[in-house]
């Protein structure tokens, strides 16, 4: 571990040197040539590949490759003060059949992803991961998977269809709090609505309809999807596909113009017909009633918003604003019954640091506490969970971002074990994240 820390330290020192030298750069990329520019100013570390990458993009083929590394640990409270190093690499290939000269309206997406190392979440006593980057494609497994392989075909300017293996983190979009923990918040509570994870796997087979009421997906978009409730990034999903394990999801997002500045409102709902394990179980001494009790179906309704309060140039992505999420679920089998989050986030507030960003957020989960009823008493396992996170992302270059991060989390786990009667202390988690875009 000492050698590993030394390598990271040297790498960060080099990148700081790069950021100091960036002011001397003059060449910039342009919309027509997005990968151009010199080493200091271009959008990716590897640039335009001698012009080939810009040519491919003009013809509808793009490759987005990134590596995110994190070093994170619990400094007080929680279950353990162990520090952990890990990371995740991702390659997303997109093909626009219209630009490629084949046929109009077709879009193919293929995503390859893998992680390594460990995250700090098991040491916090929290249900919600404090390091989203270590959750995908599978938590605790160092493997390379294909979470997305799907095709979208627009039949008109207003509607299209989608089918294939879907990376569902693309839903519940929010301008200030969304993603996989690469550049905004690290805690999963600020990346997507955790109440949806019970019935919507991260990677699963699905099909549906995409509607564009104004022809512009950035103005308004409606998604109507049918997804397999059972899915993994490491499998195709066909072997577990069943009409008795389906999730029906409807979601709509619209751009608003409150205060003359950009904002969005999103509303969605889902229902799964799967047979789930009930969160409440009864342990009897009668040998004839030892089976696991089940609960048929699960539903959730969710909402999120983002709204700029300061936006010097509308639509530029610069300025600051507020965001929030809310959801309500059935309470059984989905024990994450109510979820709330609020925060402030922004980018480019300093003219000398146009690509720096920051965020401060709070979340709260009201848990319908699972119980085990035994002949000698009732045991409850969890409590409500809440946390606060703050980060600042330093743009060393457009393709390298370094983000110090702090979280204070009162985890849902009450105690270290069933035999430990003392309450677990609130965990303070520090982290450092480095994202490189190739």
Image (cartoon, grey):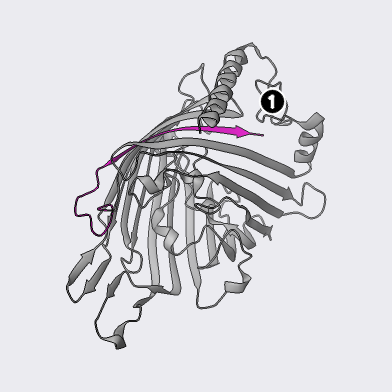
Observer able to see residue 183: no
In percent of width and height, residue 1 lies at: 51, 34
Task: Give me the residue at 52% from left, 68% from top.
Answer: 230
In percent of width and height, residue 364 lies at: 29, 48
Q: Which residue is mark 1?
A: 29
Q: Quarter-wise, where is residue 89 in the image?
A: top right
Magenta residues (range): 414-438
In percent of width and height, residue 435 lies at: 56, 33
User: In this image, 11 relative to 199: left or right?
Assistant: right
Up-down relation of residue 385 to residue 321 (above or below): below
User: In this image, 80 relative to 264: left or right?
Assistant: left
| Figure label count | 1
Q: In the image as oriented, which residue stretches furthest toward the top?
A: 24
Taking depth in this image into account, of 77 and 169 the one nearest to the observer is 77
Taking depth in this image into account, of 251 and 11 the one nearest to the observer is 11
Task: Give me the residue at 65% from left, 20% from top.
Answer: 40
Q: In the image as oriented, which residue stretches furthest toward the front?
A: 2
Up-down relation of residue 210 to residue 86 (above or below): below
User: In this image, 141 relative to 365: left or right?
Assistant: right
Q: In the image as oriented, which residue stretches furthest toward the bottom?
A: 288
Taking depth in this image into account, of 375 and 235 the one nearest to the observer is 375
Q: Quarter-wise, where is residue 360 in the image?
A: top left
Task: Give me the residue at 62% from left, 59% from top.
Answer: 159
Quadrant containing the C terminus is top right
């Amino acid at each position: 571990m000492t050698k590993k820390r030394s390598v990271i330290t040297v790498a960060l020192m080099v990148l700081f040197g790069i950021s100091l030298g960036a002011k001397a750069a003059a060449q910039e990329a342009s919309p027509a040539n997005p990968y151009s520019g010199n080493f200091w100013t271009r959008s990716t570390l590897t640039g335009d590949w001698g012009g080939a990458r810009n040519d491919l993009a003009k013809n509808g083929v793009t490759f987005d490759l990134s590596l995110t590394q994190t070093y994170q640990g619990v400094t007080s409270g929680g279950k353990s003060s162990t520090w952990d190093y890990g990371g995740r690499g991702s390659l997303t290939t997109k093909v626009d059949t219209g630009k490629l000269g084949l046929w109009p309206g077709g879009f193919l997406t293929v995503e390859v992803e893998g992680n390594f190392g460990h995250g700090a979440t098991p040491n916090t006593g929290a249900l919600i991961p404090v390091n989203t980057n270590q959750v995908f494609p599978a938590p605790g497994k160092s493997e390379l998977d294909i979470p997305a392989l799907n095709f979208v075909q627009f039949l008109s300017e207003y509607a299209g269809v989608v089918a294939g293996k879907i990376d569902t983190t693309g839903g519940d979009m929010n301008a200030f709090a969304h993603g996989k923990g690469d550049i905004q918040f690290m805690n999963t509570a600020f990346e997507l609505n955790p109440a949806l994870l019970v019935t919507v796997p991260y990677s699963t087979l699905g099909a549906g309809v995409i509607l564009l009421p104004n022809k512009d997906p950035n103005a308004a978009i409606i998604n109507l999807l049918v997804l397999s409730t059972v899915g993994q990034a490491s499998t195709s999903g066909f072997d577990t596909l069943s009409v008795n394990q389906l999730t029906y999801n409807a979601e709509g997002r619209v751009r608003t113009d409150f205060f003359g500045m950009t904002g969005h409102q999103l509303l969605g709902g889902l229902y799964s017909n799967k047979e789930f394990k009930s969160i409440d179980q009864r342990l009897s001494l009668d040998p004839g009633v030892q089976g696991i009790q089940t609960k048929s179906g699960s539903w959730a309704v969710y909402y999120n918003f983002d709204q700029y309060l300061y936006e010097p140039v509308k639509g530029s992505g610069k300025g600051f604003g507020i965001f929030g999420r809310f959801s309500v679920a059935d309470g059984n089998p989905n024990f994450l019954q109510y979820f709330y989050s609020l925060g402030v986030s922004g980018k480019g507030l300093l003219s000398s640091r146009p690509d720096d960003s920051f965020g401060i957020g709070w979340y709260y989960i009201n848990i319908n506490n699972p119980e085990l009823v035994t002949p000698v008493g009732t045991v409850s396992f969890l409590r409500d969970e809440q946390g606060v996170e703050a980060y600042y992302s330093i743009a060393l270059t457009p393709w390298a971002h370094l983000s110090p991060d702090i979280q204070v989390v009162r985890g849902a786990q009450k105690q270290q074990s069933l035999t430990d009667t003392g309450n677990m202390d609130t965990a303070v988690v520090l982290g450092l994240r480095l994202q490189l875009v190739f």
